[in-house]
């Protein structure tokens, strides 16, 4: 059973959508100025009041191409629990395996139809279909806070 109420989920989506079109920039977290995928989801959950303020550990932009260490997933698990795909609801988190590790995060708007994420190839925070472009064959895992 999810601990996120309908109101909390609505707040997560309201905050996430306010970030839409923020330019993609590695290791940044300023709404309207620049953000990467990890900083985006962290900032949304903090601003929505779901988790207390915290700092995302620093990382190199392409760490997942050279290391198998699950840095992002391990960090997510300190705030969330893994759930089955059939239990994924709006406001939950989906991680994509890129390269050698789960290294891309998105917030679910309506699974499996729509997510919002800071997408490097698009150059900004966008709403998208979950398996468009570079994500088309990526394995996924789901998490709820």
Image: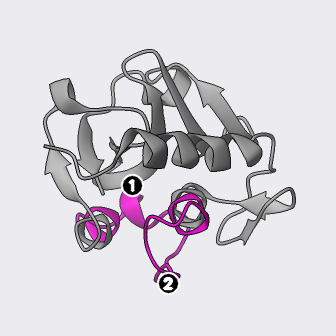
Q: For mark 1, give the secondary structure.
A: strand
Q: Identify the residue shown where x is 53% and y is 82%.
A: 53
Please give the label number shown on residue 103: 1
Percent of width and height locating residue 99: 35, 48
Which of the two labelled residues, at mark 1 and mark 2, occupies the earlier sequence position?
Answer: 2
Marks counted in the figure total 2
Front tag of 1 and 2? 2
* Mark 1 Cα shell of 10 Å, populated few (<14), some (14-19), many (≥20): many
Of residues 143 and 72, the one drawn nearer to the viewer in this rendering? 143
Work out whether 131 lies above or below 24: above
Work out whether 120 lies above or below 136: below
Whether 20 is among the magenta residues is: no
Of residues 58 and 31, the one drawn nearer to the viewer in this rendering? 31
Residue 130 is drawn in which quadrant?
top left
| Residue with the most extreme top position | 113
Percent of width and height locating residue 12: 53, 48
Q: Identify the residue shown where x is 71% and y is 70%.
A: 28
Q: Judge whether residue 106 can be spotted in this image.
A: no
Q: Give the range drawn in magenta.
A: 44-73
Left-right relation of 108 to 14: left
Do the numbered discs 1 and 2 sit on residues whose CB atoms are within 8 Å?
A: no
* Alpha carbon distance from label 1 to label 2: 19 Å
Magenta stretch, main secondary structure class: loop
Work out whether 63 lies above or below 100: below
Q: Where's the C terminus, which quadrant?
A: bottom left
* Mark 2 Cα shell of 10 Å, populated few (<14), some (14-19), many (≥20): few
Percent of width and height locating residue 35: 70, 60
Please give the label number shown on residue 54: 2
């Amino acid at each position: 059973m999810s601990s996120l109420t309908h109101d909390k989920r609505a707040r997560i989506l309201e905050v996430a959508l306010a970030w839409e079109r923020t330019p993609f920039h590695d290791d940044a977290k300023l709404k309207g100025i620049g953000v990467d995928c990890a900083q985006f989801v962290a900032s949304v959950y903090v601003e929505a009041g779901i988790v207390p303020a915290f700092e995302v550990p620093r990382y190199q932009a392409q760490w997942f191409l050279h290391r198998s260490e699950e840095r992002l997933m391990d960090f997510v698990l300190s705030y969330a629990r893994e759930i089955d795909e059939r239990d994924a609801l709006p406001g939950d988190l989906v991680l994509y395996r890129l390269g050698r590790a789960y290294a891309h995060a998105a917030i679910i708007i309506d699974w499996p139809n729509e997510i919002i994420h800071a997408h490097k190839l698009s150059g900004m925070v966008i709403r998208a279909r979950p398996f468009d472009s570079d994500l088309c064959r990526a394995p996924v895992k789901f998490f709820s806070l």
